[in-house]
Image (tube, rainbow, N blue to C red):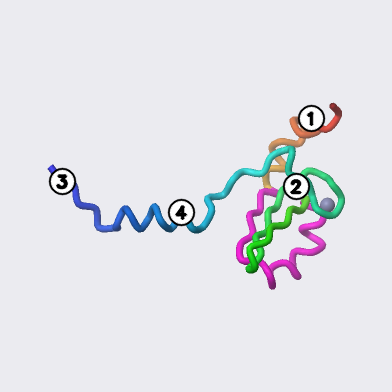
Amino acid sequence: MLCKVTAPRSEEGDVTATITPATPLTAVDRCDRCGAQAYVRVTLTNGGELLFCAHHMRRYGEELRKVAAEIQDETERLNETTTASAAAEER
Ligand SMILES: [Zn+2]
């Protein structure tokens, strides 16, 4: 009972392993510029990684897109988790 799928499964696995599956940014991820909670992870073409808050992503976004291999943008989460992150921020 082999159910043959047209898309090769093994390849799919390899691809997700190579391109790191988006790890959600958390409260411990901090903007490299100001230390605020990061909502954007920028993977550079040289393998480096930068984190930015929404504010600095807006400021540097244009430049970053030139050198970034991948940009994980979670700024939309700001709208949902405003109260939760604010509470965590207070400590
Ligand atoms: Zn920042």
Residue that protrudes farthest toward the front in the picture: 47
Q: Amino acid at mark 2?
A: Ala
Q: Is residue 61 magenta?
A: yes
Residue 46, given in percent of the width and then of the height, sits at: 65, 68
Residue 60: image x %, image y %? 79, 64
Circle 2 — which element?
loop
Give neighbour class at mark 1: few <14, some 14-19, many 20+ (Cα, 10 Å): few
Circle on res. 2: 3
Direction from residue 3 to residue 35 in the image, left or right: right
Label 1 – label 2 distance at C-alpha: 14 Å
Q: Name the image quarter holding residue 48.
A: bottom right
Q: If you read the primary sequence from the N terminus, does the residue marked by circle 1 or circle 3 appear first?
A: 3
Residue 88 image label = 1
Say if disc 2 is inside 8 Å of ligand 1.
yes
In this rendered view, identify the residue nearer to me: 13 or 38.
13
User: What numbered label is drawn on residue 38?
Assistant: 2
What stretch of residues is rendered in magenta? 54-75
